[in-house]
Amino acid sequence: MNKAAFAGNDSPESPVVRRLRAGIRARYRRERRFRRLGAASLVVGALFLLWLLGTSAFKAAGAFSQTCIAIDIALDAAEFDGDAPYQREAIAAAPYNRMIRAALRAAFPEVTARRDKRRLYQLISDGVQYHLRDRVLADPQLIGGTHRLWLLADDEVDLLIKGRIDRNLPQANRRLSDQSINWIDRLQADGRVERRFNRHFFTAGDSRDAEQAGILGAVMGSVFTLGVTMLLAVPVGIAAAVYLQEFAPRNRFIDLVEVNINNLAAVPSITFGLLGLALLINFFGMPRSVPLVGGMVLALMTLPTIIISSRAALAAVPPRIRQAALALGASRVQAVVHHVLPLALPGMLTGAIIGLAQALGETAPLLAIGMVAFIVDVPGAVTDPATALPVQIYLWADSPERAFVERTAAAIVVLLAALAAVNGLIAVLRNKVEKRW
Amino acid sequence: MSANLATLAGWPAALAGLLLLTAGPAQAREHIHIVGSSTVYPFTTVVAEKFGRATSFKTPIIESTGSGGGLKLFCAGAGAAHPDFTNSSRRIKKSEFRQCMENGVTDIIEIKIGYDGIVIANSRRAPRMALTRREIFLALAKDIPSPDGGESPVPNPYRTWRDINPDLPAAAIEVLGPPPTSGTRDAFVELAMEGGCQSFKGLAAMRKTDQRAYQAACHHLREDGAFVETGENDNLIVQKLAATPNAFGIFGFSFLDQNADQVQGARVDGVAPEFENIADGTYPISRPLYLYAKAAHIGVIPGMREFMAELTDEDTWGEEGYLTDRGLIPMPDAERAQFRRATVERLRLDLL
């Protein structure tokens, strides 16, 4: 090419070059803008997540500690039937409530009016008598002596100690009277009020007394429900996906099945609950409120998700793997089971986990089959009545007592932690078994 | 690998086995099963918990299904597969009662457990409001009788409370309340809205001539943003009110009682929503709460009789019982005695 001509055409002043340069600059600008937009949306998402985690954790912090009050309780031997060694029945039947009340009166001897006494008794949680019973059952040596025991305070007292009740409000506008606050202040000055780790929150079932309410019942309910879901949905879902992807003939019927599966994945979850109610409870006569039914319903709900993602995982395995296996004399089943399935497994696992995580957070289908319920006893089997974690959050959020606000937040934190743990586990598993080609 | 295939094929069989195992006639239950109103739920659950602790019976299981849903389940039949009690924040309807009869639930015990006031509350940071039911109606009805005395109703023109009554604050009308599925909403519409509606001669006359049009005029709440449906979660309403001083919320008395440091109830027709005023009936927006028992289950489901005894105990529902600590308004002595007798003597409810 003629150099002069080249230089002439391409000289910096040439309008063509200028237009090209401007075009390139504009393109770079657009690309930069696009990248920044992507990063910005990531930041927005992260901010929302931080906000959710931050507010939940902030509100929940209080729920992990609980106010206790030390009271000198006289476990008078006369209150127990028989003589030492005491029978278990005698210990269980002793009037602990009376002993606790006597101890409270002894701590504040000036309280005599009936109304005031009633208020005094309310400083201590209602469930303390049962805790005391369990303590004495575990250690009968306590009988006959006077012991300073740390007892669970009432939720109102707890809120006061945590600074959630404004002392400066007129008495009529708060749940604790001036008198009660005065008592608590005196106990506190004596060093008899302490915030301790809230063990009950992790070891107890639901309760209408906030200070005794725990999340174990709901956690166990979720574990049983998801266990049933996993046992049913994962094998069935994977088997269905393998058949549809690898073996099914291409005909109208199979097309119809596929359309239906995609459809089912988008059906609102309450529909599955109603199906469970009609089929499992009304037709098969299975009991209400049990994780077995809940797990089956959630299995139906997650099945389409698992099938669709498992099929995608199978489709992503290159055809050359199958062809190589077949060429070496493997049968079609052998080719799939020995070669394709192991390669697709990480993807299938991810799909299964996404389905199960969805099931973990679901409440609507559980409403129809009676799992949105007040259940105190911690379930021990899939046929015991139970709720689930998100249901517990919903029920606590709707409780009038203020102390449930922090418990609701704490339950949300527990649910989020469980979800994070499940997803983290899967990330680790997938990295371990994932194969690349 | 054939073993793998066998397990794969075995799954449908295992599933069928699982179904068969739990299917068949429902076995006798060991726990009491209660369904129904979310308004009564906070009270029955407390009783259930005490009952479970103090006796050797299992703690009853209480579902929160709403009054209507509860009665539907309750009336579906007798036998262990169906609930033993249902909570209701209104009385059973004739149609529901008939449904019960048709399904073999012929022996129902009606237990009124107490009263609940519905309050219109705002944040303590704003001045306390005093409203009449007529003003409540004018603030919240979708259509109101024309303010200039015209015949036909006009879409609600009021934007601020001052537009309705010059003595009220100039703040925009913003009321948070429960959705139509809620028993609290039903009661509010019936007692407050209809109460206000009756104060208009034309509308009150319409009640006799055209029941339908009357209900449409009196029961329809605004849909232009002045009334905000906030879901069944009353606690959320309380939290929102604390944050927005100009907003009002509609919820049950127990929520006001538990959150009296943050919200205050408006006087209605000059009466403050206080314990005594609701108990003696002077506060106009209050309703009875019920528990319905299936008498046929007494002696079949363990603890039925004992649970009713716990509920009707003076320490439970009396003037100083533990339910009053939770915001339940107790019935007068005579009424308590009457419903206690109903449970002891298994008095059969007859509405037809």
Image (cartoon, coloured by chain):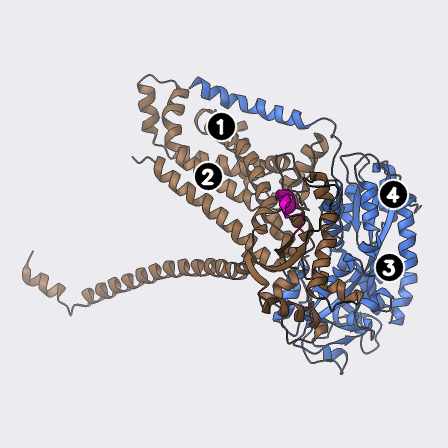
**Chain A's colour?**
brown
Q: Amino acid at mark 4?
A: Ile
* Camera-side mark, 1 or 3: 3
Chain blue in the figure, letter: B
Q: Report, in whole angstroms, how far the alpha carbon at label 2 lies from the one at label 3.
A: 56 Å
Q: Nearer the viewer, mark 4 or mark 3?
A: 3
Relative horizontal placement of residue B1, taking residue B287 as reference (left or right): left
Q: Quadrant of residue B24?
A: top right
Which residue is label 3 attached to? B331
Pointer 1 indicates a residue of which chain?
A: A
Q: Is residue A83 left or right of residue A14?
A: right
- Residue on which the image places disc 2: A351
How far, Cα to Cα, is label 4 from label 1?
50 Å
Query: Label 4 to label 2, Cα distance in Å?
Result: 50 Å
Three-letter amino acid code of the residue under disc 1: Ala
Q: Chain of mark 4?
A: B
Q: In the rendered structure, which segment of residues is drawn in magenta?
A: A134-145
Residue B212 position, x and y percent, is: 85, 58
